[in-house]
Image (spheres, rainbow, N blue to C red):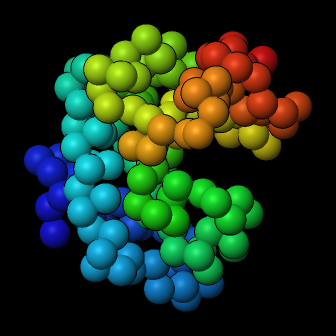
Amino acid sequence: MNLSQHFTLAELTASNKAQQLRIDNTPPQELVPRLVRTAEMLERIRSTLGVPVVVTSGYRGQALNKAVGGVTSSDHTQGHAADIVVPGFGSAYQVARALAPLVSTLGIGQLILEGVKGKQWVHVSTRTPDKTSNRVITITDAGAQLGIQELV
C-alpha cells in the first residue's frame, strides 16, 4: 500500500527484529492516517535534500518497541516518527544540520540527531514535543543536548 509517492506501508513497518522475533508489526487501521502524514513529511525531506531517504525504523507496535529498547512514550508506536539515513546526501550529522533550520517549513515536529552504540541516524516526527526546547536535539551515549551537535 502506497502512503505517498515514494513511501509504502511495508517500508514504514519493516523490521528485521520483528521478523527475527516473529512479532506482528501491522499497525491498527486507525494509525494509517498518521503514517500517511509521516510519509508526506518524508516526501518533503526527500524533495528538500534532492535524494532518496532510507527509513531504518518507522512504525513500531508496543511489542517491537519493547524488544528494541524504545521508550514507552515513543512516537514510533503512534505512527508519528521515522528514523532515517540519507546516504546520497551525507552523514546523519550533515542531514540533521540541513534539516534543522527547516523544521517548521517541512512539518517536522521533532528532529533528533542520534549517535548511540556506534550507529548514527536522524529521527523525525510529525509530533511537536511539549517542551519546545526539545524540538531539535542531539542524543548520544553521553545523553541529550540541545540543537544539532557534531558527533565524535
Where does residue 72 sit, x and y in percent of width and height? 68, 65
Q: Residue furthest right?
A: 142
Q: Nearer the viewer, residue 84 or 110?
A: 110
Where does residue 9 sit, x and y in percent of width and height? 27, 65
Q: Residue furthest left?
A: 5
Q: Residue at x 23, y 31 (%)?
A: 44
Q: Nearer the viewer, residue 45 or 73?
A: 73
Q: Residue furthest front?
A: 130
Q: On the image, which quarter does residue 69 sit in? A: bottom right
Decide: is 74 above or below 115: below
Decide: is 140 above or below 37: above
Q: On the image, which quarter does residue 1 sit in? A: bottom left
Where does residue 4 sit, x and y in percent of width and height? 15, 51
Pick the quarter of the image with the C terminus.
top right
Q: On the image, which quarter does residue 13 sit in? A: bottom left
**Residue 42, visible in the rendered structure:** yes
Where does residue 8 sit, x and y in percent of width and height? 23, 60
Q: Residue at x 61, y 80 (%)?
A: 63
Q: Residue at x 75, y 40 (%)?
A: 116
**Residue 121, visible in the rendered structure:** no
Decide: is 152 above or below 25: above
* Left or right of 54 on screen, residue 3: left
* Left or right of 22 on screen, residue 28: left
Q: Nearer the viewer, residue 42 or 133?
A: 133
Q: Residue at x 41, y 60 (%)?
A: 79
| Number of marks | 0
